[in-house]
Amino acid sequence: MGETILNLQKITKRFGDTKVLKGIDLTIEKGEFITFLGPSGCGKTTTLRIIAGLETPDTGKVILNGEDVTDTEPNKRDVNTVFQSYALFPHMDVASNIGYGLKLKKTSKETIKKKIEEVLELVQLQGFEKRKPSELSGGQKQRVAIARAIINNPKILLLDEPLGALDLQLRRQMQLELKKLQKKLGITFIYITHDQEEAINMSDRIVVMRDGIFEQTGTPDEVYNTPLTSYVARFVGNANVIEGKVSSIGEDRIVVTVGQENIAVKKSEKDYKVGDRITLAVRSENILVNDEMEYPITAKVTEKSFAGGLLRMVFQLENKEELVASRHGINYNLEIGDEAKIGWNMDNVVIVNN
């Protein structure tokens, strides 16, 4: 086990009649890249602001590096924040923006100059010292904001959707750069986003948030391949969620009836009985079409489209439920209205909670 750097204990927060956080608990280790993932309004930014000291929880504690900082002022916490808006001083050049915090601390000019040079190299902006923010691209402004945040070598860097204003290609490039930078610095990064791809690409662990609670916490692989709830399955990777009734239970499997068809899932630790309602999740890329499968389902093609090299097909079951199948670099000789046999390997479907 690593060294714990941050502990959130039963944090609640209410704004007016709305309970934004509903008793969240989380332990973060030193050097982790943690991402809070969820839609707008789920409590991500409020959680970040409480860690930063910009909001005070109604109940609960924030323990930073073993010290209770719940009521400690923001400037007395060893934490820095990078915002989506960059918040650069327009009248200052790059060097002055980056060194501003050190200047406030009355650090010597020689030390400030040396540290600015070091962080400019880290964020690959050597030679940009004299430029004003208006002379920089979006990606360059973001690098300056990050450099300003890391120059004090904080124990935790908070990043509030910092890539949200960038175009797709630049955002993907910055994802890789941020991850490399985090590993090089060894600083704990706490990142918030609503972009599942961003979370999966960058994180050591993902915290999926929903309506003020932590729905699931785990590695990108755990959250993607073994979602605990139908919400996580749909939000991370847009999985197909299927509801049915347990029709039989074998040594290694549970057979589930959906409409008039049977499908199977591996037995779980939870005990089910014949007749129980059950919810399953299967990823679109794991849907087999007219292939060898133990439990084929008859379905009709209702949509077919290509996005780049990705084929997306929607199949309607007899009970009118729809399942989405997707494949890269492949086409099926099927058109809208055609019938097909679809299914999946038992290893690729998981039982989830509603």
Image (cartoon, rainbow, N blue to C red):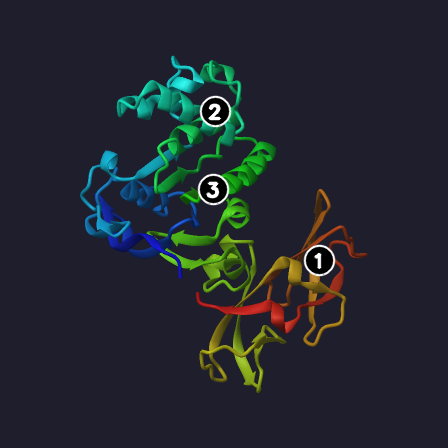
Q: Estimate the spatial distance between the alpha carbons at disc 1 and disc 3, rounded to whole Å.
A: 45 Å
Instruction: Please name the residue shown 55% across and 85% down the image.
Output: 249
Tag 3's secondary structure?
Answer: helix
**Relative to the observer, which residue lies in front, 98 or 164?**
98
Contact flag, marks 1 and 3 (Cβ < 8 Å):
no
Query: Is residue 124 left or right of 116 when viewed as pictured?
Result: right
Q: Nearer the viewer, residue 243 or 23?
A: 23
Observer able to see residue 128: yes
Distance between the alpha carbons at the discs numbered 2 and 3: 18 Å
Q: Secondary structure at mark 2?
A: helix
Q: Amino acid at mark 1?
A: Val
The residue identified by callout 2 is 141
Residue occupying image coordinates x 37% and y 48%: 42
Which image quadrant: the C terminus?
A: bottom left
Q: Which residue is mark 3?
A: 182
Mark whose residue sits in front, 1 or 2 = 2
Task: Name the residue type under label 3.
Answer: Gln
Asked where in the image residue 153 lies, by quadrant, the reply is: top left
Residue for badge 1: 301
- How many C-alpha atoms fall within 10 Å of the one at disc 1: few (<14), some, or many (≥20)? many
